[in-house]
Image (cartoon, rainbow, N blue to C red):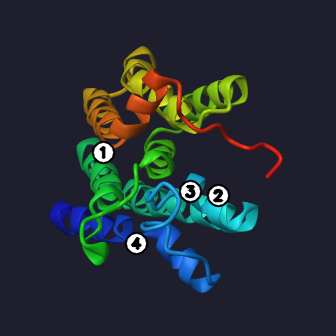
Amino acid sequence: MNVLWIVGAYLMGSIASAVVVARLMGLPDPRTQGSGNPGATNVLRLGGKKAAALTLLGDVLKGVIPVLAARLAGLPETGVALVALAAFLGHLYPVFFGFKGGKGVATAFGVLVAGVSLLGLAILATWLAVAFATRISSLSALTAAALAPLYAHWLGLALVWTVVSAVIAVLVFWRHRSNIRNLLAGREERIDLRR
C-alpha cells in the first residue's frame, strides 16, 4: 500500500505549477526564459506577483496534499516521510515534463510543514529572516535547507525526518549549483520587493 502512496505523491509532485500557470496566463515558458527555472521566483520576473503567487501556492500544495492525506490515512511515520520525499522528487524530476523540474524549495516546505508542522514553520521562519535581511532568494533557500536536518534533530523528531530533511537539503544544494557560483562571485540577483 505504501508503494501506491509513494507513486501517487511522485505524480502529484510532477505537476509543474510554473509551467501550468505560465500557459494559463499567456506568459513565456519559465523553462526557457529568465533564469530557466520553473519556480515562483522566475515566474515573478516574467509575469509579476499574481503569477508568482499562484505558482508558489501550487508548488506548496502539491507537497502538502499527499503528505497530509498520508498522515490522515494513518500511514506509519516512515511511510509519511517517504511520501514527502516522493512528492519532492516529483517536483525536481517531473515525469510529465521530461524530468526537468524546479529547485524544490516551495515543495520542500509543503511536504515538511504537512509532515511535521513545527519543522516546516522553522524552515519558513529561516527563509523569511534571510530573505528580508539579504533579499537573495537562493541564499534564503540554501540557509533554510542546511538548517532543516538540525531543526529535525533539535525538535526530537523521528530519525526518518532528520534523514529525509538531510536528503532534501543535499538535493536543494545540488539544484542551486549555479546560484552558489553566483553567490560566491557576488552576481546573484536580488528579490525586487517593489514587485
Q: Sequence-wise, which precedes: disc 2 or disc 1?
A: 2
Residue of label 1: 81
| Cα distance between the residues tagged 2 and 3 | 5 Å
What residue type is disc 4 on? Ile
CA–CA distance between discs 3 and 4? 17 Å
Q: Residue at x 68, y 68 (%)?
A: 47
Marks 1,3: beta carbons within 8 A: no
Dot 3 and dot 4 residues touching (CB under 8 Å): no
* First reached walking from the N terminus: tag 1 or tag 4: 4
Under circle 3, the secondary element is: helix
In the picture of the structure, the residue carrying the numbered disc 4 is: 15
Q: Tell me which numbered mark, 1 or 3, is placed earlier along the sequence.
A: 3
Q: Indicate which disc residue 33 carries.
A: none
Residue 189 position within the rendered picture, expressed as x and y whole percent measured from the top left: 59, 39
Q: Looking at the image, tell me whether mark 2 or mark 4 is earlier in sequence order.
A: 4
Question: Distance from label 1 to label 3 (Cα)?
Answer: 29 Å
The residue beneath circle 3 is 42
**Callout 2 touching callout 4 (CB < 8 Å):** no
Q: Is residue 19 above or below residue 40?
A: below
Mark 2 sits on what residue?
Answer: 45
